[in-house]
Amino acid sequence: MRVLILGGDGYLGWPTAMSFSNKGHEVFIVDNYLRRNLCRDLDVEPLFSIPNLLSRVRIWKELTGKEINVRLGDCCDYNFLTKVFNEFKPQTVIHYAEQPSAPYSMLDHNAAHLTLLNNLISTLNIIWAVKENVPDCHIIKLGTMGEYGTPNIDIEEGWLEIEHKGRKDKFLFPRQASSLYHTTKIQDTDLLWFYVRIWGLRVTDLMQGPVYGLSTDETELDERLSTFFNYDELFGTVVNRFIVQAVAGYPLTVYGKGGQTRGYLNIRDTIACVELSMLNPADSGELRIFNQITETFTVNELAGKVAKVGNERGHKVAIKSVENPRVEQEEHYYNPVFSGLKELGLEPHFLTDDVLHSMFQIVENHKENIARHKIFRGVKWKS
């Protein structure tokens, strides 16, 4: 298939691009280095440096003989984006091209403005580029489980059937975001649902939980093909952060009571879920929603898992509760449905001790690069 990956330089975008290329798909990627630039400007660069995108695709071709097409540009620039769509004529477009951090979105007004503008305008431009150039193209958008919040009922897979005063209907499951970033993802879903109804677009919206891990079949070919590994509070996901903290001898930072429960998945499963969605596209006029997680944990459970493996490897791992900088429930009910992708054939990779040991090994190999000042910034939801 002809696959256009927007945000193809990112933590998820680059491994997805390599995986799809390796499986024979024609891959075209776009990126504007937003994440790289924000990390540089905020002094939160990843654990190890990553070659630029043009170098990455050159290395990929040298090792595999396979070509990935690249355009450097901004998805918020509609003229640029529509030219890419017209040139490549994708059958599937994968939308990773958003500012991905909840803490960053709460940092200050400038960060809030960038998040709102980048995420919503990029989504709007993608919708119009599809409509004007390839109206049958399947849009796959990475949403987030954070759109749902933590309701005191089971979280269904995107939709909720309601009976009210003797009548029944089906609606998008109620959303209640916990950050501006998550709010923009809700608005993404609303934009897509509107244009699905109006123009008959075909869309899959993947409500993804926090991702962990570094290794895929392709990144293991050569360390120069690695993806970003952030360990800071702004762009590092919780499992990745905890492992770096353990190696650095920095107490694992558990926010408040640590009972916050979320759904998680391995980076390999992110790629598998996106591929399954691509190979089994939504119908015209359908907004299909999958909850993209494989298992749930509290923050305390994650800290305990990391501490256990870290101590086995000789690190003296401490766990420390810190004042919660976020506005969120620290103890709550959480029971999401996540069966749709399994029904399509997903075979999950779970967070085992072996997986954690392999992640520890990579971090230990780069231990000298850990900068302790990057780990915790104390970004507060309420100043």
Image (cartoon, rainbow, N blue to C red):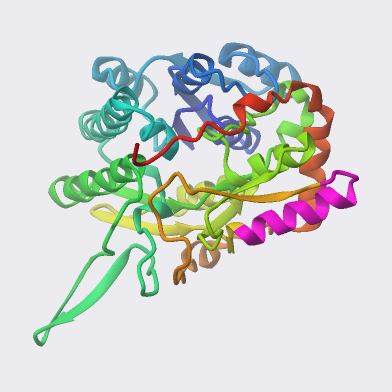
Q: What residue is shown at x 28% (from left), y 58% (from top)?
A: 175
Q: Position of residue 55 (x, y in %)?
A: 63, 12
Q: What residue is shown at x 44% (from left), y 72% (from top)?
A: 333
Q: How many marks?
A: 0
For residue 135, above or below residue 225: below
Q: Main secondary structure of the magenta part?
A: helix
Residue 373 falls left or right of residue 317: left
Q: Which residues are magenta?
A: 300-316
Quarter-of-image position of residue 257: bottom right
Quarter-of-image position of residue 57: top right
Residue 276 falls left or right of residue 98: right
> In the rendered image, is residue 228 in sight?
yes
Q: Considering depth in this image, is 236 or 160 the residue closer to the camera?
A: 236
| The C terminus, quarter of image | top left
Q: Is 31 included in the stretch rendered in magenta?
A: no
Q: Considering depth in this image, is 65 or 220 the residue closer to the camera?
A: 220
Q: Considering depth in this image, is 239 or 322 the residue closer to the camera?
A: 322
For residue 356, above or below residue 37: below
Q: Is 306 included in the stretch rendered in magenta?
A: yes
Q: Position of residue 118 (x, y in %)?
A: 31, 27
